[in-house]
Amino acid sequence: MKIAVTSTGPTLDDTVEERFGRCPYFLIIDPDTLEFEPFENPNIALGGGAGIQSAQLMANKGVSVVLTGNCGPNAFQTFGAAGVQVITGVSGQVRQAIEQYKSGAVSSTAGPNVQSHFGMGMGGGMGRGRGMGMSRGRGMGGEMSASSARGGSSQPKSVPLSKEEELKKLKDQANELHKQIEAIETSMNALEKK
């Protein structure tokens, strides 16, 4: 059995990286012997699709389980199709994460725990610390800045969307929800077959 853990570095003593698709390293580990293969994530700098590409890479490496902080809907759906179990909300040292897995202290995730493009940083996506964040007490949409809490705004005022733009936005959201539902149904079907 092979377990993949997202990591900030190439050793078992490095920290579990909270981002899946854009983690600096993947460690593929035999949980019984703790033998492992570290490798740099070749998808970290992709403009889009890093989660999907990284999930396909893990499936191609024969991984059965992935331990990570967060996993978005596209990567989660890819894992579901490949029959790879995903466990989110994992933190601490990689070595500790493996021990938690072996002891049963962590369990499979029923669905993605962040929205698409989590962790892309400024200029694209939602940025670190935002998203659905079911595992770490984060609310949807992220934290309120000190300036907006005082009534000020660190961002320019938004211009109301036109009817067409609002409709497109709603359709995009509906499509994303459909993808998430498909991923959940795929996972349920896979579990029912076991």
Image: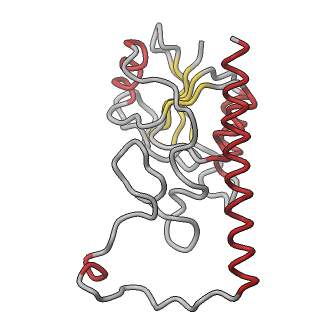
Can you give x and y, in whole percent of width and height, for residue 188 in the image?
67, 26
Q: Is residue 46 left or right of residue 99?
A: right
Which quadrant is home to the N terminus?
top right
State whether residue 164 is above or below residue 72: below
> At which x and y percent is residue 124?
58, 69
Residue in the picture at 35% in, 45% down: 136
How has the structure been colored for display? secondary structure
The number of numbered discs placed on residues in the rendered structure image is: 0
Seen in the picture, residue 172 relative to 110 is either above or below; the reply is below
| Residue found at x 69% / y 31% | 80
Q: Name the foreground residue: 109 vs 52.
A: 109
Q: Position of residue 130 (x, y in %)?
A: 44, 59
Along the line of sight, the residue nearer the viewer: 152 or 117: 152
- Which quarter of the figure has residue 92? top left
Residue 173 is situated, as x and y percent measured from the top left of the image, at 67, 62
Q: Is residue 87 above or below residue 137?
A: above
Residue at left offset 36%, top offset 38%: 15
- Nearest the viewer among 89 and 177 is 177
Residue 140 left/right relative to 77: left
Task: Determine the image quadrant of residue 163.
Answer: bottom right
Q: Nearer the viewer, residue 13 or 115?
A: 115
Looking at the image, which residue is at 68% across and 11% down? Answer: 194
